[in-house]
Amino acid sequence: MKKIGVIGGLSWVSTAEYYRLLNKMTQEKLGGVNSARLSIESVNRQKYVRHVIDEKDEVAAAEIILDAARCLERAGADFIVISCNDVHRFVPKIEPVVSIPILHIAEATAEAIRKAEIDTVGLVGVRKTMEEGFYSEVLRCHGISTLIPNDDERTHIHDSIYNELVKEVFLDATRRKYVEIFDGLQSRGAGGIVLGCTEIPLLIGDRDVKAKTFSTTEIHCAAAVEMALT
């Protein structure tokens, strides 16, 4: 069994879900009371957010993630998963300077979308995930087109993540607004919705909406377990 290195803390809420799913899926694969072999390097989200939001210093933010990756490298991890969608924008800069691979969340998600035979998806997450090309470009390379919510909807989603979900606050009113946004994306041609923030699946999923949803947290963890066991 390969050792999974997890960069966590972005937020602790989704990091806890990664730990739960990685172990649950490993036990389902191997039986008995097997659990995942892993190390978690948990960064300080407040420091990361200060660089990204307050200082708009992407270099300093990337350095936090690179330092975490190097810690996992030294801890003997065979590969890395980052428990945050938008932080994957740094993967092209980080992966070449560490000796172990990074399992990209958008690549894993693209494979799941292709298996579902869907060619157009709605993408929701923080602003950087929705508006910058690093995520939709990966999907495009797999033949998948991406739709995003309108500006007001993007603001609502982004703010709800920063002010509620990362603090383990899940409100019915927020869920209802997400349902409205998802329905709008589906009416525009989205065959499914990518839950492109690792906290969103804790708020909403297939049980709540008409559209098929793709939980990037669950998809990423399943891909990581598969990689660890092959």
Image (cartoon, helix red, strand yellow):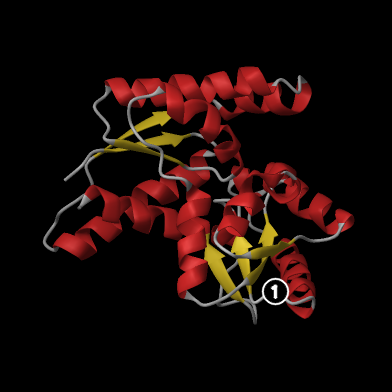
Nearer to us in this view, 198 or 109? 109
* Farthest left residue in view: 32
Q: Can the viewer see residue 43?
A: no
Q: Is residue 102 above or below residue 150?
A: above
> Quadrant of residue 101 in the image?
top left
> At 64% from the left edge and 51% from the top edge, which residue is drawn?
137
> Quadrant of residue 99 in the image?
top left
Q: Is residue 147 above or below residue 196?
A: below
> At 51% from the left edge and 61% from the top edge, which residue is drawn?
110
> In x, y percent, where is residue 69?
41, 26
Nearer to us in this view, 106 or 7? 106
**Residue where numbered disc 1 is placed:** 190
User: How many residues crowd mark 1 within 10 Å: few (<14), some (14–19), many (20+)?
Assistant: many
> At 11% from the left edge and 61% from the top edge, which residue is drawn?
32
> In x, y percent, where is residue 224?
34, 50
Query: Viewed as shown, does residue 40 lie left or right of 85?
Result: left
Query: Viewed as shown, does residue 20 lie left or right of 150?
Result: left
Q: Which three-letter amino acid code belongs to the residue tagged 1?
A: Ala
Q: Can the viewer see residue 158?
A: yes
> At 61% from the left edge and 65% from the top edge, which residue is drawn?
144
Instruction: State the SS at label 1.
Output: loop
